Image (cartoon, helix red, strand yellow):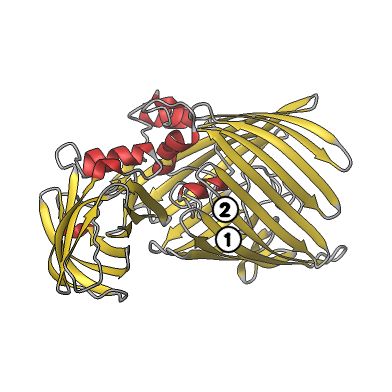
Amino acid sequence: MKKFLFLGFLFAGNALAATYTFNKNNNKVDWQAVGNPGFLRINAEGGSAEGVIYADGGKVSGALTVDLRDYRTGIELRDEHMKNKYLMVDKYPKAKLVLKNQSYLEGKEITTKGLLTLKDETKPVDVIFTVTGKLLDAKFKIKLSDFPSVGIPSHLGVTVANELTVNVKANL
Amino acid sequence: MKNLIVIISLLFSTSAFSFPSNTRLGYSSCSSCHISPTGGGILTSYGRDTAADILSTFSDKKEAQPLHGALDPYLPMERTIIKEDLSLLIGGDFRYIVINKNNFWMQRDVELAVSLNKTVTLAVSAGYYLNEIESRRSYLLVNLNENLSVRLGKFFPAYGILFDDHTVATRRGLGWDQGQESYNLEFAYKNQLGEIFITPTVGTSPVLDMGSRKGYTIRTNETGIATRLAGYVGEKSQVGVSSYYLVNQDLENPSVNIYYGAYGLLGLTEDIYLLTEFDIANQQDIFSTNQLGWEILKGLHLVGSYQRRASINEWDAKAQWFPRPHLEVSLAYNYTDIRTSTVMMLHYYL
């Protein structure tokens, strides 16, 4: 039961043009979901974003991808269902987030729009982030109902709640 | 044929105890894996499947099914569908104990749950104890929605940690040993942040009087209420507080019992956990159970514990192994201020 994706973002908070490179060593992208009945807490770890974000004149643009095959939730059967049954990582190994000319301000919590691609569907998401120096902290929510090709994971009566939360921490 | 198979399956017993250490794997509430809102007892379909995946060292694909999958598809991992939304779940336990040089059957139980649209569930257990057949746990459960449930029947009220060992200080010491289930009406509310249980009780031996002029009445010397409030902490832990108030109006031995305490189910890492409970009984006696466990490889646990029962201190060291679905073996050394013992348990659950 599960899904996936994530995205990263980052930004640096000054007016000078800059390029920020994400790699597997400088950030972590995790996500949390809830399964019912029982409010089972599902925590997926192991992923990180790769890509480049450009910051110039108070605007940011760029694209980041996450390899969904990297995620683990602590239970092998659940990981297998998540990757093979719902995310189909053999065919769609990556999730992608694209930002286009989004505003930011260093040290302030900003909400910005991104386009998230999961499998072959692309939907807008609201990303809340804060950049302080080289540190980025961000999160956003994904509604599984927005991605019918992924669906709502369910296994033997336990169903994942429609909304899950993605968290990103980066040190660029 | 299908009915015969179901009847045969009822000869197997049911797991009456829970495994609160699974909190460290994100199972902060018991309802994902158990029919009972407080855990223990009959497993849900998901709980059965998960038991193979997270509890056992080795397992094959259908092995967690009743009778190891031998009667598939009549007894599948999923609920056995009787008719449309009416489904059946079965469970059972055999536990055989060797304490020093004494050996005996500790538990031989069967449990059956019938569920209508997964909203209304009737669960009944029957076991063979001391040459008698006894039902220690039976209830009607109504899940009003994903947060709220009501349960009426005979079971342990929600208080502290429902340890998988009924002899620990905070179970046996407080009067919740095996065979001491009471008759209760439980109200439970759960959400992502925590849970609360409020359980009025009429004690362990009420009498239903069907001959009174008022119609049916329940006569009991005991009335009381148990409450438990818990919060889910992070991804792996739960902490809570409990209280219990019971009045016994027996003419010869009237009494009032007041307990209150706190507990924690703490997932320190994915493999190391601490189960700790501290209770005060009648404002004078301390009862405490503390278990530090380490799952050194999947299904194999080493557990050290310290308990206090009023003025007696007790230490245990235990190795607990779930080699395959349905099987558990444990070996424990127990030391108290007044005695020592070695306990081996063999457990088969349906």
Question: Residue B54: where, in percent of width, then height?
Answer: 46, 37
Residue A82 is left or right of residue B317, and the answer is: left
Q: At label 1, which amino acid type do we have?
A: Val
Rendered image quadrant of residue A93: top left
The residues bearing labels 1 and 2 have C-alpha atoms spaced at a distance of: 8 Å
State the residue at coordinates (14%, 38%).
A91
Residue B270 is left or right of residue B278, and the answer is: left
State the residue at coordinates (50%, 64%).
B195
Disc 1: which chain?
A: B
Q: Secondary structure at mark 1?
A: strand
Rendered image quadrant of residue B78: top left
Query: Which label is found at residue A19?
Result: none
State the residue at coordinates (71%, 36%).
B317
On the question of residue A38 being in view, the answer is: yes
- Marks 1 and 2 belong to one chain: yes
Residues tagged 1 and 2 counted as in contact (Cβ below 8 A): yes
Q: Is residue A38 above or below residue B283?
A: above
Q: At label 2, which amino acid type do we have?
A: Leu
Using the image as rendered, state which of residue B10 and residue A114 is in the foreground.
A114
**Which residue of the protein is positioned furthest toward the front in this rendering?**
A16
Question: Residue A83: where, in percent of width, then height?
Answer: 25, 41
Question: Residue B189: where, in percent of width, then height?
Answer: 48, 66
Return the residue at label 1.
Answer: B239
Badge nearest the viewer, 1 or 2: 2
Return the residue at label 2.
Answer: B266
The N terminus of chain B is located in which quarter?
top left
Q: Secondary structure at mark 2?
A: strand
Q: Earlier in the sequence, mark 1 or mark 2?
A: 1
On the question of residue B13 being in view, the answer is: no
